[in-house]
Amino acid sequence: MATVSDITASATINGLSAILFLVLFGILRLQPMNDRVYFSKWYLKESELIDHAGLDSAVYIRIYLLGLKIFVPIALLAFTVLLPVNYTDRNFEILITKVEDLTFSQIDKFSISNVPSGSKRLFVHIFMAYVFTFWTCYMLYREYKIVTDMRLHFLATEKRRPDQFTVLVRNIPPDVDESVSEYVEHFFRVNHPDQYLLHQVVYNANKLAKIVNQKKDLRNRLVYYTNKYERRPNRRPTTKAGFWGLWGKTIDAIDYYSAEIEKLSNKEVAERERVIGDPKAVVPAAFVSFKSRWGAAVCAQTQQTRNPTHWITDWAPEPRDVYWDNLSMPFMELNIRRVLMAGAFIGLTFFFMIPIAFVQTLANIESIEKVVPFLKPIIDAGSMKAIIQGFLPGIVLKIFLILLPMILMEMSKIEGYFTISTLESRAAGKFHLFLLVNVFLGSIITGTVLQQIQVFLKESPSEIPKIASVAIPMKATFFITYIMVDGWAGIAAEILKVVPLIIFHLKNIFLVKTEIDREQATDQGSLLWATYEPRMQLYFLLGLVYSTVTPILLPFIIVFFAFAYLVFRHQVINVYDQKYESAASYWPDVHRRIIIGLMISQILLLGLLSTKQALHSTPFMLVLPVLTFLFHRYCKSRFESAFRRFPLQDAMIKDTLENAREPHLNLRTYLRGAYIHPVFKGLELDTSMDVYEDDNPVVATTRRSHKGSSGELSSILVA
């Protein structure tokens, strides 16, 4: 069990690490050669910089402020009321005389474990649980309302974008007489005759995209060797014919890459012609654009046919948010993929219990000494014990979690979601569940068993729940070390950007050959929502759970939120380049996960009090989760629709204002090609169909009459 000296050692190590990272950042940021790493936004135009920041980044920063607004008042109350109540009691003094092998530290005396079973002091914890719950709910309601107003105002004042007029139609049913493009055009001319404008079919061009990317890479290499030859015309540049030009026969680089590009160009032309000419390359999906935002809102938010699995319509993502690789997946295949990935995620979650248990053995080194006594001289030597317990458990767990977000993102891609924002949202949901099950519950369960293993073996079964109620709050020491590693030193490493800094200079030395290479080497990406938001939710969970159990943890949580706010505010302003803008559509997920953490804290406190013979507390504590759930349902019904739908009234107002300001706007020209696959950009490719003139009352079709199908007509009347 970690002691005060262990926590002090961990705080010293991680505090010094944070200071070291900040000092290095202060030095390295002044070097001009590092500008593209630390101030990459300086290389954007001012208008691009303004457009880049967006509402997503602003609301993300507000989440850290929300953590401060919730936990600073809670910490003040907890330190004023709960800490004296816990510390001045004497439960450990009583237990230590009865249970020989019970381990605890001075920090544990600040927890509820130091309050004896049946004590009237436990009602103070119940009262404070109500206070903390009401305060948290008040701040959540207030923030939900603010973010909702910000979103609606942002959408109302936002510049014109293609996705405001467009819906994505999926699972278009097959038709024996018409192509997908013809069928889409006729369907929307009939069912949305006054608003339909044009549409863009979706091609399965994944193979073509790979060829185009390969060609770009080879062309970049050719530019490098051509420039090299122009600087030294008396010597032709050479390369190796093997992998990445590292080995193999020495050949003329310019001739080799010119020939390879020509081969790929021919292959690209053939594949493009195949895709355009093959009806099977058209997937049952299309981007359909309308004459107004109002028309798009009506279509996106209504059911199109009696069969809800056909002609599924959703708001189209903005063009840069589209994940084109997944648009070609069939509807049934998507369901199968998601079931398989759900099973894989469950297996992955339980598999990670093994390293979590290993980490807990480091956090509870006294238990290891008892089982393996020959390690005791090594562990007790000098400050080794303090380093092992105060620093190593957190850093080992951090290492185990580094690759997990990337794995979860790949799983979301396999599931077939067709927007980058949805991919990140789904990956964030998986990561949040993983942290909840493994890092939080797993650490408590495995830590309790390892820490008190001899006690569990010696005592009678009736005594185990009591001992567990004492042991579970003791895990606060482990979480304190984890917060300092991940939330202090980890956040400081974020501003230093150690990995991007190293990668940039390695690429600059070994791989950068042209200006295009340099731009790619300095790509700072965007906020890693799938990583940062679940990690943030873990701190909300820890703060809410331990606010009434072990309040001494709260200052560490507060330092994290304050430090992270400053760091990520700097990153958003100076570094990150947001890939898309969702107008804070993720906020309902943030709210729901904080509510889940709040309810978990209430349920755990209820279980803890029941083991402490506070039977009269059960009715009082059972009310809290119910009230919290009802609060969540109210917020959901009150605000969430603003994040899932667009009000028709606002759409009409925006359309009216735009028509008054730009009466001669050619919307068809603006929207044509907005949702064309990137590999077709810049080509004269007519893959859309325009609306017929309004004075044409009949839409000619190629349909034939089929026996027994009276609904199939040779033409569709629209007037």
Image (spheres, rainbow, N blue to C red):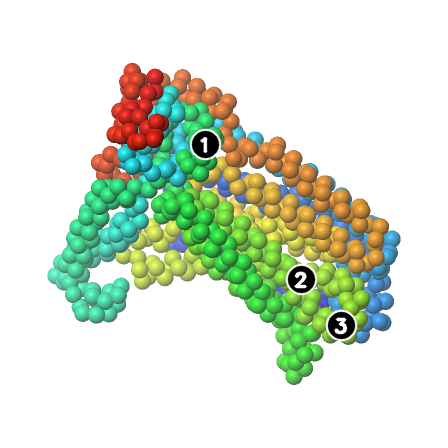
Quick one: which residue is furthest to the bottom in this view?
374
Q: Which residue is mark 2?
A: 444
Quadrant for the C terminus in the image: top left
**Is 173 rendered above or below residue 480?**
above
Asked if the residues shown at circle 3 and circle 2 are in contact, with their CB atoms under 8 angstroms apart, the answer is no
Residue at 28 percent of width and 51 percent of height: 207
Query: Callout 1, which amino acid?
Result: Arg
Among numbered discs 3 and 1, the one appearing first in the sequence: 1
Query: Quick one: label 2, few (<14), some, or many (20+) residues within 10 Å?
Result: many
Q: Which residue is mark 1?
A: 306
Labels in figure, total:
3
In three-dimensional space, the C-alpha distance between marks 3 and 1, rounded to whole angstroms, equals 64 Å
In three-dimensional space, the C-alpha distance between marks 2 and 1, rounded to whole angstroms, equals 50 Å
Among numbered discs 3 and 2, the one appearing first in the sequence: 2
Quarter of the view holding residue 411? bottom left
Residue at 71 percent of width and 72 percent of height: 453
Q: Which residue is mark 3?
A: 455
Quick one: which residue is furthest to the top in this view?
695
Task: Determine whether the residue tagged by mark 3 lies in a helix, strand or loop.
Answer: helix
Residue at 26 percent of width and 54 percent of height: 214
Query: Callout 3, which amino acid?
Result: Val
